[in-house]
Amino acid sequence: MAIILLVRHGQNDMVGKKLAGRLPDVHLNEAGRTQAGNLAAAFSGLPIKAIFSSPLERTLETTHPIAREHDLTVEILPDLLEIDFGNWQGQDLEELKKSSDWKYVQEQPADFRFPMGESFAEAQQRMATCLTHIGEIYQKDDLVVCVGHSDMIRLSVAHFLGIPLNDFQRLRIETASVTVLYLSDGKANFGAINHVLSFPENLKPGD
């Protein structure tokens, strides 16, 4: 049974403002770099066998401190890429929320395809196939890190827990959070889901 640590990339200036998608040159900001360092410190005592990452800059910048701590080479997996948002990529979130499709995306994502892009169902299948393959090639209790994106991790959790695709939007995956997936023979169990090393800014005590 492989143990897969699903990690969302750290904070960047587009989070909560624009739909970054697969845009190049989206880098971690200062807060994100701090998060990446904190993740590396938290993982320092773990017997990690391999580290996989989406090829985008913000995921690689999150991954590299972990890899250096364990003297491992980051293996890039294109299947960990963010959803192909098509024409929505790079758009302002507040403007997208005004579109006629926004409510459809939130309430009936199982039937939605992004214009000139990918469907949620395709993205979910891509991620599930990728993680299942990783679970097959590693041995019982091997610890593997996969650094990727919020929607892709949410879709994975929904898939392996049997949550209907139309309900996956109810899940939250914060920046630099860790979700622990135990995967063997296509069967899955979860430890922590969306574990954060510190409270997100909007949830800090006293706010």
Image: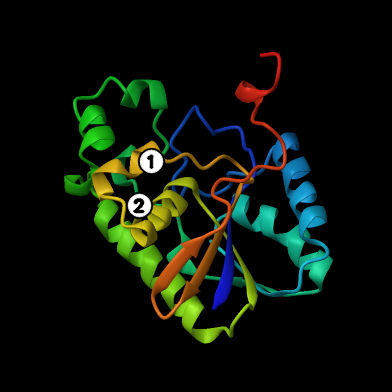
Q: Is residue 140 left or right of residue 127?
A: right
Q: Amino acid at mark 2?
A: Asp
Q: Nearer the viewer, residue 32 or 187?
A: 187
Colour pattern of the rendering: rainbow
Q: Is residue 113 left or right of residue 179?
A: left
Q: Is residue 74 left or right of residue 4?
A: right
Q: Is residue 118 visible?
A: no
What is the x, y in percent for residue 14? 54, 33
Q: Amino acid at mark 1?
A: Gln
Q: Quick check: 82 above or below 26?
A: below
Label 1 sits on a secondary structure element that is loop
Could you give the CA–CA distance between mark 2 and mark 1, rounded to whole angstroms? 8 Å
Q: Nearer the viewer, residue 171 or 33?
A: 171
* Residue named by callout 1: 89
What is the x, y in percent for residue 154? 42, 49
What is the x, y in percent for residue 6? 56, 58
Q: Characterize the local packing of mark 1: few (<14), some (14-19) or many (20 or more) Cα atoms within 10 angstroms.
A: some
Count every numbered label the image shows and give the total: 2
Question: Residue 147's quadrant in the figure?
Answer: bottom right
Question: Residue 106's quadrant in the figure?
Answer: top left
What is the x, y in percent for residue 15? 54, 33
Q: Label 1 near label 2: C-beta < 8 Å?
A: yes
Label 2 sits on a secondary structure element that is loop
Q: Is residue 146 left or right of residue 30?
A: left
Return the disc, 2 or 1, that comes first in the chain's sequence: 2
Q: Is residue 152 visible?
A: yes
* Residue named by callout 2: 84
